[in-house]
Amino acid sequence: MVKKYFSKLLLIIFVLLSKCIPNVQSCHNPEAVDLILFNFYINPYQHQVYNVHNFHEIFNHSSFLRNRNTVIYHYGSSQTATSSPIVETIDTYLSYGNVNFVLVNYESITTNVSGNSCTIGENIAEALIRLFNSGYSPKQVHLVGFSSGSTVVAIAGREIISRSNHQHVIERITGLDPGQGREEMRLRIGDAKFTDTVHTEGVGFGDLNTRGDVQFFVNGGVVQPMCHSLIPHIAWTCSHLFVITLWNESIRTQHLSFASLQCESWEHFLHNDCNHNAPVGHIGPFTSSALRGSYFLETNLQPPYSK
Ligand SMILES: *[C@@H]1O[C@H](CO)[C@@H](O)[C@H](O)[C@H]1NC(C)=O
Ligand SMILES: *[C@@H]1O[C@H](CO)[C@@H](O)[C@H](O)[C@H]1NC(C)=O
Ligand SMILES: *[C@@H]1O[C@H](CO)[C@@H](O)[C@H](O)[C@H]1NC(C)=O
């Protein structure tokens, strides 16, 4: 009898906790604010560090070119500014991107990005709104997030729109293999003028259900053919990181790459049963903002990956 009530009580406590805790953890964590840094790269080896309070001063930095677009990149939960895929990304953008490149970075890797995505997103929004009030246009901004980073930049985009009463809308947000997480926080249509997602892994870390105006499914998007392993975790990690390699290639080639077709599913793509009236899509900085829906493509198994 006692046991029965006890388990009921536990269940009620569990339900209450699971309803309350995420909100408390995700948006009211003031300590996280001072850990958020913005590294503005002057060259791959040199950067100026800003924080939420002074980020808008980037506008006056002699290396910040006001007529250029700015990419603000947010890495995934377990990465840092010195993780090799991120070092490669920085180098690629600085050498071939023709943009001002800013990396959102954390002083302490103990900052739990997935647990703090709401606080972090809101603070990035605040920093950006100040930059826009200083005269830089949101039309020149492209937010890019990898894995859980795509949730953070989505929250930032959404917050900028609501805080500025639709006065400031980010031009583009890209989710690179967007991570799993609470559904209401994930990237969605309307977080920017144009939103796109690129999917390379859909079982372990990535979330195939996160959709932008257009979503690209690379080699089906679930697991990559060059990432086979008997240990699922290895195959997932390799497939998840492949989106960074692909993005890197799309910037380095500096022209349209990774041609894709609009289809209902991967099976339809494999049977050459796609919508040939829809425009051909391309992944990368040159993706047309007119694209809508699901696009599929195959890559080579070795670099260059674009067919
Ligand atoms: C840029 O510099 C000018 C002139 O010193 C100053 O008036 C302005 O407030 C600065 N803008 C930002 C965003 O720091
Ligand atoms: C990060 O936060 C999430 C959500 O609150 C939690 O599920 C996860 O266990 C945390 N990870 C670490 C390493 O603390
Ligand atoms: C980045 O892209 C270039 C060009 O395709 C390639 O040579 C290089 O290996 C890539 N690096 C990574 C880490 O993917």
Image (tube, rainbow, N blue to C red):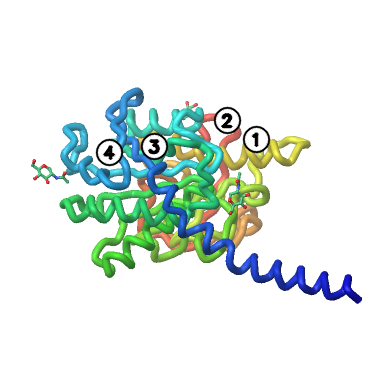
Q: CA distance from mark 3 to mark 1?
A: 21 Å
The numbered disc on residue 302 is 2
Per the image, label 3 sits on a secondary structure element best described as helix
The first of marks 3 and 1 along the sequence is 1
- The residue located at (41%, 42%) in the rendering is 35
What residue did someone put label 3 on?
Answer: 251
Marks 3,1: beta carbons within 8 A: no
269 vs 42, nearest the viewer? 42
Provide residue 252's location: percent of width, then percent of height: 39, 32
Q: Is residue 173 left or right of residue 176?
A: left
Q: CA distance from mark 1 to mark 4?
A: 33 Å
Q: Dot 4: within a 10 Å radius of its alpha carbon, few (fewer than 14), some, or many (20 or more) residues?
A: many
What residue did someone put label 4 on?
Answer: 100
Q: Specify the amino acid type for callout 3.
A: Ile
Q: Specify the amino acid type for callout 4.
A: Asn
Per the image, label 4 sits on a secondary structure element best described as strand
- Outermost residue, top direction? 45
Per the image, label 2 sits on a secondary structure element best described as loop
Nearest to viewer (mark 3 / mark 2)? 3
The first of marks 3 and 4 along the sequence is 4
